[in-house]
Image (cartoon, helix red, strand yellow):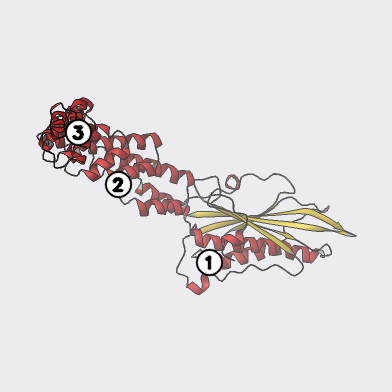
Amino acid sequence: MRVALILLLLSGCGPWGAARRANTVESYADFLAGYPDHGKVPTALNRSEKLRWKRCEDRRDSASFRAYLYAHPDGENAKKATVQLDHAIWREAKTRRGMESYLLNYPEGRHISDAVVALEKLDWSEAEEANTARAYASYISHNPDSERAEEARVRRDDLLWAAVTDKDSVQAYRRYLEGNQKGNYRDKAQARIEQLIFTHATIVVRARDTWRPNGRQLSDNLVREIKKQFAKELINLGYNKNMPIHSVDHKGKQPPHPLDSHPVSAGTGLIVVDLEERKGEEIPPAFVTIIKATVSIYAAGRRDPLGSGWIEQRTSPYVPPTSQERMNWDAEVRAGDMLIRAIRQEEFLKPKAVEAKDKDRIGVHGPSGSEAAYGSHMDGGKKDGSMMNRLGH
């Protein structure tokens, strides 16, 4: 029996013989795992290392170099494998995620500078493709010291300014000034604010369409009451109390643009009060009258209003003529009240110091027996469905 075993070993039919005949990384790994005390362990390790290194040279991928270093951390080619692993990882880092992972996991890697340059180029390409202020801001935050940083700042500033001038509002210009301490358009922004913020105003009250057969004339009393209310609120904001006021009855005709008939210069605003009447449902023997009052504010240098507020009110069908005028005036004043309150929030006007308790003093109350709807179009922005919601009521 002993002789047979010796002959078997000599013939190479044992576990070592099987591993040697296969001569693969896997066969030697199985042998080493199964026979850690075998006399051929050093030989198996040596052959396994050579085979693993040959695989590394053939494949040159990070997985092969990692496998070699894991199995032979002190092997003959361990130093070479460490260097080649760094190169392989960089070669495989073809995406933003891969390059960022390389920077994070190999802070002392041989391709750190390559990764920084590649990421900067990628950041710039993405910023140019997006071509937005936010994209260039992101580029600057990631590459503050790059050669393109100044160009990115200029492009961002140009895009911001284009958006600001498109909106053309006091708040937009102020946000630009606050967020761009070194912006190239700061002087222009400040100059435009001075044009849009005014301390003098002209008021124009315009009678528009009416369904009533006898038409409607703007009585002196109606104009006087409107001016009185506007003056009271606007003086609180620092206005000159000697504001000119004009009244025009267009008798159903399309009026000209307010700035064509009443041009204004820098520092002077134009407040346009429009009154319209529509026929509502019939409640024999009379009809409901729907009164819509719109107040708009214009400034020098732009055709669109800085803001507008409107109120639509339904009257009782039995309102006598004298009360009708009162309701016309009431609708006008209430629309004006709301717009003036919004003006304080939007800062169209140049305010003087107003105590906090006065800032919310303006109320909006409908007359008994009437229903009212509200709306606004502030600062050339999106139209709000409800002025009351905008003002926090």
Q: Which mark is residue 235?
A: 1
Q: Farthest residue in the right direction?
A: 285
Of pointers 2 and 3, the one earlier in the residue sequence: 3
Specify whether 320 is left or right of 193. right
Q: Amino acid at mark 1?
A: Ile
Residue under the image location 82 percent in, 65 percent down = 320
Residue 284 occupies quadrant:
bottom right
- Judged by depth in the image, the label closer to the viewer, 3 or 1, is 3
Residue under the image location 77 percent in, 55 percent down = 216
Helix or strand or loop: what does disc 3 sit on? helix
Q: Amino acid at mark 2?
A: Ser
**Residue 339 locus on image (x, y percent):** 58, 60
Residue under the image location 69 percent in, 62 percent down = 331
Of pointers 1 and 2, the one earlier in the residue sequence: 2
263 to 147, vertically: above or below: below
In space, the residues marked 3 and 1 are separated at their CA atoms by 105 Å
**Residue 327 locus on image (x, y percent):** 73, 64
Residue 135 occupies quadrant:
top left
**Residue 29 locus on image (x, y percent):** 21, 36
In space, the residues marked 2 and 3 are separated at their CA atoms by 62 Å
> Considering depth in this image, is 330 or 204 the residue closer to the camera?
330
Q: Residues within 10 Å of mark 3 (few under 14, many from 20)?
A: some
